[in-house]
Amino acid sequence: MASIQVTTIMVKINKFQITPEDQYQKEEILEIHLQLFSILRDKLPPELKGRTVIQLTAGSTLKDLLIELDIYRRVAISVNDAQERDHSRTLKDGDKVKIFTSVGGG
């Protein structure tokens, strides 16, 4: 593996100093507390018993979470113990997401 040496270069612009690290905003990571029920638990290793903390990038939605988990079936979701039908809802750091299989009948 090649060794890379990084040199910090400071540039003075209008009394402000900008380093190369400042030019790129670091991607914020969210931690989402996830619990899966029924057959959805198979999406996680058995030892987790359907519970884990998953990391997503800031701005991720419920739809992004479902895609990340490879869940393409109809499901019921609660976020922070409130039912959530809008899969475009943006998640926040620390959200508690529970995903259930949808049960229908007639």
Image: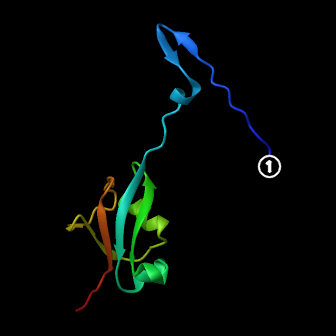
Quarter of the image holding residue 36? bottom left
Q: Residue at x 30, y 72 (%)?
A: 98
- Judged from the image, the secondary structure of the residue bearing numbered disc 1 is loop
Q: Residue furthest right?
A: 2
Q: Quadrant of residue 77?
A: bottom left
Disc count in the image? Answer: 1
> Is residue 64 toward the left or the right of residue 81 in the image?
right
User: In the rendered image of this protein, does residue 90 appear above or below residue 28?
Assistant: below
Colour scheme? rainbow
Q: Nearer the viewer, residue 48 or 64?
A: 48
The residue depicted at 47 percent of the width and 83 percent of the height is: 46
Instruction: From the viewer's perspective, tell me whether residue 86 is left or right of residue 29.
Output: left
Q: Residue at x 51, y 15 (%)?
A: 17
Q: Position of residue 69 (x, y in %)?
A: 47, 70
Q: Residues within 10 Å of mark 1 (few under 14, many from 20)?
A: few
The residue closer to the viewer here, 52 or 36, is 52
> In the current view of this chain or complex, which residue is farthest to the left?
82
Give x and y (percent) for residue 30.
Answer: 39, 53
The residue wearing badge 1 is 1
Q: In which quadrant will I find the C terminus?
A: bottom left
- In the rendered view, tell whether residue 55 sits above or below residue 39: above
Q: Residue furthest top?
A: 14
Amino acid type, residue under disc 1 in the picture: Met
* Residue 65, position as x, y percentages in the image: 42, 63
Q: Where in the figure is residue 87, as x and y percent of width and height? A: 33, 62
Looking at the image, residue 19 sits to the left or right of residue 7; the answer is left
Please tell me whether residue 79 is drawn above or below residue 5 in the rendered image. Answer: below
